[in-house]
Image: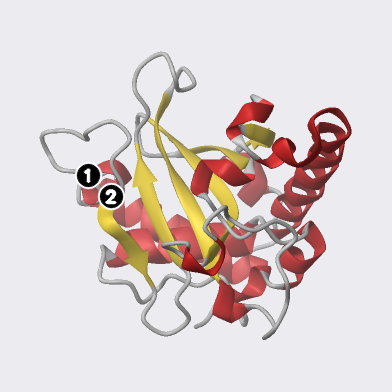
Amino acid sequence: MTSKTMTPVQAAHTVIETITQMAQEQRPLMLRVVPEEGANFWTHYPKSDARDKFCKARWYYHVHAPGSRDAGEHGHFHLFLHRTQLPKGLEPKVWPPQGEDAKAHVTHLIALSIDTNGIPRSWFSVNRFVTNEFLFPAETMIDHLPDFNVDNTKEDDCVNRFVTAMVALYRDEIAELLRERDAKHAELVAEHGDAAYEKTSGLEVLSSIPIDLDAKISGMDLG
């Protein structure tokens, strides 16, 4: 099943299934993406990112050093669409400084924070410079949320399916975070001009919401 055809109810079932499997196997999410001896701070896991072989969407997971991450967070996923998943010829709102020579031709969709037990704890959006993305407007990204699918990367199948399903389950919330991101960008542009999208703006996280997975799923009719 692709993310385009996945309904919220189907996504909820997949999230429950994958979390249950991880618990039964006593292999929490982080042990499926980082070395058993622990993660090196800031390193991408996997090294060259997890890339879907069909649509080129991708994810990577990393862990910030103590003092630069929220209390209770183990690490977080950064989730991306590839530029080829957007309409041909569509111009980014903001380009990486390297232009077409940028190393990765991706646009950042959202980030997913994971707690020390391997359970989702929050969603958040980031400023352009954090991932050196090709930045597209929120409404463009919202239109293409159903195109995010990482079921077919070379990484752990349970993790792939979990990440794909989480995006499908939380499309409405992610859409709102992207709109809030753009609104914050507008405020920063008024203050900093074009530097709003770069490190000199001083802001990395532009919008965020906590995740209560139990409340989300218990409020649904799963049939």
Q: Is residue 150 left or right of residue 172?
A: left
Dot 1 amino acid type: Val
**Which badge, 2 or 1, comes first in the chain's sequence?**
1
Name which residue lies at 26% across and 50% down. 33
Q: How would you rate the neighbour count of disc 1 (Cα within 10 Å): few for under 14, some for 14-19, many for 20 or more? A: some
Whether label 2 touches label 1, CB < 8 Å: yes
Rendering coords of residue 123 (x, y %)? 60, 41
Q: Is residue 199 left or right of residue 115?
A: right
Instruction: Indicate which disc residue 45 carries.
Output: 2
Q: Is residue 143 left or right of residue 13?
A: right
Q: Is residue 43 visible?
A: yes
SS at mark 1 in the image: loop
The residue labelled by disc 1 is: 34
SS at mark 2 in the image: strand
Rendering coords of residue 68 (x, y %)? 44, 19
Q: CA distance from mark 2 to mark 1?
A: 6 Å
